[in-house]
Image (cartoon, rainbow, N blue to C red):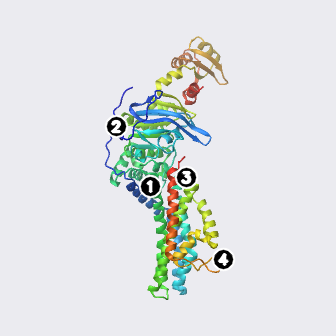
Amino acid sequence: MSTPPDKKPLEKPPEVNQIGDGKVVIAARRVSYWYGQVIAVNDVSLDIGEGVVGLLGPNGAGKSTLLKCITGQIRPTTGMVTIDGRRVWDDPTVYAELGFVPEQDAFYEEMSGRDFVIHLTRLQGFSTADATTLAEEAIETVALTEQAHRPIREYSKGMRQRIKIAQALAHRPRVIFLDEPLSGTDPVGRRHIIDLIRRLGDEGRTLLVSSHILHEVQAMTDNIVLINRGRVVADGNLYRIREMIDEHPHRIFVECAEPRKFASLMTAFDDVLRLEFHDRGIFVSTNDPESCYSRIRDLCLDNDLKLQAMTSSDNNLSAVFRYLVP
Amino acid sequence: MSSSPTATIERPPRTLSALTLGARLLTLDFKRQLFSRKALVNIVIQLLPVLIGLVAITTQGLDGTTLFRNLISNVYLPLLIPLTALFFGGPTVINEIEGRTITYLTLRPLPRAILYLAKFGASLLTTLLITVIPIVLLAAVCMIGASEPLGDLLPLFAGGIGAAALGAIAYTAIFAALAVLFYATLLPGIVYFVVVEMVFAAIPILELLSVRFHMRTIAGLQQERGFLAGLIADEPLAFEWWVGVLIAAFFAIAATAVATVVFRQRQFHV
């Protein structure tokens, strides 16, 4: 899709980093969105290039509202969004190159999966024959061919998720938005979708994937935008953000047979900053989590301390945001 | 930053003309509506007076002309046509919003105004088909039991069918517009029907605001006055049939224009 001569990409202010490769495909400038007195998206500026970009944030962070602003479903209260240099709001021609997997579980329930995808692909301007071919290819891509004739109301959550992805891919868009695409999928389906997203990104398409689960996004891409309370709190390469996270102490909860003995062994290491006893175990704060994890396992093994559990709440996004947002 | 290849995507040729896509949406939606359970229920309801008429004419020997006039005046125009229009006009786009499927449609290369008009067109065609065909059948049934020659009956039948068609168009447009304005499928339509089509329609002068009045004008049934109208005025308001056509058409066009403008600016938080 080339930029029309009368439409130019938005000026790039120096403080906006590009996330993703190649040229800028999606540009948002000072986008805010208010629901009455509540701000859902707060002054967001982004440049997103090709490949897969993760939009990460806890529930209620404003991810879906930002996606709706970017895809032109709602008009930002202030600011503007362009895709390939075209303003999104009120320009339906943009949608010829755009696919969207909504978060909501909404379908024409009486239709078969196949008819659903054909119906929506026809509305992308294809003839019945071409729409059928494209729909069948997309359904095959999401591994749903055998169930495609069944009414959607009979589909499991995972199948419904996959048919939503099929409708977004069938017209072969260059820009694809996926809002929580792995929600409700089983491990096999999840793996399949992750591989598909990676493959589409490798083909040079732009995919913006929203999720509140860090490891899901990590499996798809290294390029992420972290959003909380409507604001972008960090963006760029995941390793850069990891480094920011690693500057802060990392808490590991250990449940073992003799917590006091375990604590005394742990005090000998410089990276251990703090030890807190709890009813069922002990919290270890460390600034070198990678070494600490393996050391805990080794110490327990060598000293015959039965290790019952080792977990870290710091792996979830809420912990990441606790680090990044004061 | 590494650079990946810009996607070169091959796909079959396609037509992105707004009118073509609009016509396609209209056709697809019309098929969906026509084969829905709601359509079946409405067809049965609309055919009931036809069956009753058939039984009355064949077993009781009732006069076909009187029967047609009575059924049109007391059953179809005031009740059955608005009923079907309410069931198909009200949900025109609100069902998509409430069912949260509107996202799929607003993210197609289709201007929102065309999207609304296509959805409305599908609802309108369905309402017309479901309401007008039974009245044509009723006319055929009543013809069997009519004492007058066919030539004398034709204006009555044509007026009845025309009034039903114009009424169906105006009601569908009004109910669809009210649903878009108030973001609800049936309630605004029911309130409108009670206030305008029942109360206003029974009061002289105010009755001009109701679709029912103009349907009666088209059908040549102006003498059928409501109880209140009889108390307030000596003579009923009477217009030529084409005035009724023009006003009913104006109602339909105005309601559709307002709804299109509102829908175009609507933001969908689904």
Instruction: Tell me the SS state at disc 4.
Output: helix
Lower sequence index among marks 3 and 4: 3
Lower sequence index among marks 4 and 2: 2
Q: Are marks 2 and 1 in contact (CB under 8 Å)?
A: no
Lower sequence index among marks 3 and 2: 2
Amino acid on which disc 3 is placed: Glu
Disc 3 designates what residue? Answer: B98
- C-alpha distance separating marks 3 and 4: 40 Å
Instruction: Tell me the SS state at disc 3.
Output: helix
- Residue A40 in the image: above or below residue B179: above
- C-alpha distance separating marks 3 and 2: 36 Å
Find residue A189 and report its horizontal and vertical position in percent: 45, 39
- C-alpha distance separating marks 1 and 3: 20 Å
Task: Please report the residue visible at 56 percent of the width from the left and 80 percent of the height from the top.
Answer: B70
Tell me the crowding category of disc 2: few under 14, some 14 to 19, or many 20 or more residues within 10 angstroms, Cα based.
some
Find residue B254 and report its horizontal and vertical position in percent: 51, 62
| Chain ID, mark 4 | B
Tell me the crowding category of disc 4: few under 14, some 14 to 19, or many 20 or more residues within 10 angstroms, Cα based.
few
Disc 2 designates what residue? Answer: B7
